[in-house]
Image (cartoon, helix red, strand yellow):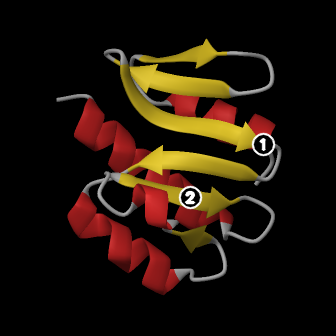
């Protein structure tokens, strides 16, 4: 997926708003992070811990959990390698978790 596609999908979900900067845009629902681009090929998505490992296992080239994220509800997404449907699934999981 491209960064624009990430933004389009995130903004298609109810009550999601874009924040952040031009170089590091982020999308939030109720002021809670859903997804943030860290660079043109990498995004951080906030997902339930119970869903993180299945995401990584289903698309190991597209997702990773760097040591700095291990204790957090976050997964790194490598947009140039991840399957688009996997990225959308992760963003949707984040949206579900954060909109409550």
Query: Looking at the rendering, which quadrant does residue 14 occupy?
Result: top left
Helix or strand or loop: what does disc 2 sit on? strand
Instruction: Check residue 92 in the rendering and tell me which mark sits there, or answer none.
Output: none
Q: Which residue is drawn at 66% across and 62% down?
A: 84
Residue ID at (81%, 47%) = 2
Task: Farthest residue to the left: give it.
Answer: 100
Image quarter (top left, top right, bottom left or bottom right) of the N terminus:
bottom right
Q: Earlier along the polypeptide chain: callout 2 or callout 1?
A: 1
Please tell me which residue is depicted at 54% across the width and 54% down the height of the picture. 88
Q: Counting other residues with Cα less than 10 Å from the Cα at mark 1, is it few (<14), some (14-19), or many (20 or more)?
A: some
User: In the image, is 38 to the left or to the right of 56?
Assistant: right
- The C terminus - image quarter: top left
Q: Is residue 54 left or right of residue 5?
A: left
Along the line of sight, the residue nearer the viewer: 86 or 53: 53
Kindly identify which residue carries mark 2.
76
> Which percent across, then down, holds residue 79?
73, 58
Q: Residues within 10 Å of mark 2 (few under 14, many from 20)?
A: many
**Label 2, label 1: how far apart the Cα atoms are:** 11 Å
Query: Please, is residue 50 above or below residue 11 in the view?
Result: below
Residue marked by disc 1: 39
Q: At x 66% / y 81%, what residue is drawn?
A: 61
């Amino acid at each position: 997926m491209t960064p624009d596609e990430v933004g389009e999908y995130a903004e298609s979900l109810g009550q999601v708003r874009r924040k952040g900067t031009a170089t590091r845009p982020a999308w939030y629902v109720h002021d809670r992070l859903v997804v943030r681009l860290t660079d043109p090929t990498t995004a951080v998505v906030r997902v339930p811990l119970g869903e993180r490992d299945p995401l990584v296992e289903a698309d190991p080239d597209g997702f990773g959990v760097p040591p700095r994220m291990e204790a957090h509800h976050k997964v790194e997404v490598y947009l140039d390698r991840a399957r688009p449907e996997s990225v959308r699934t992760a963003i949707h999981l984040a949206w579900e978790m954060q909109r409550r």
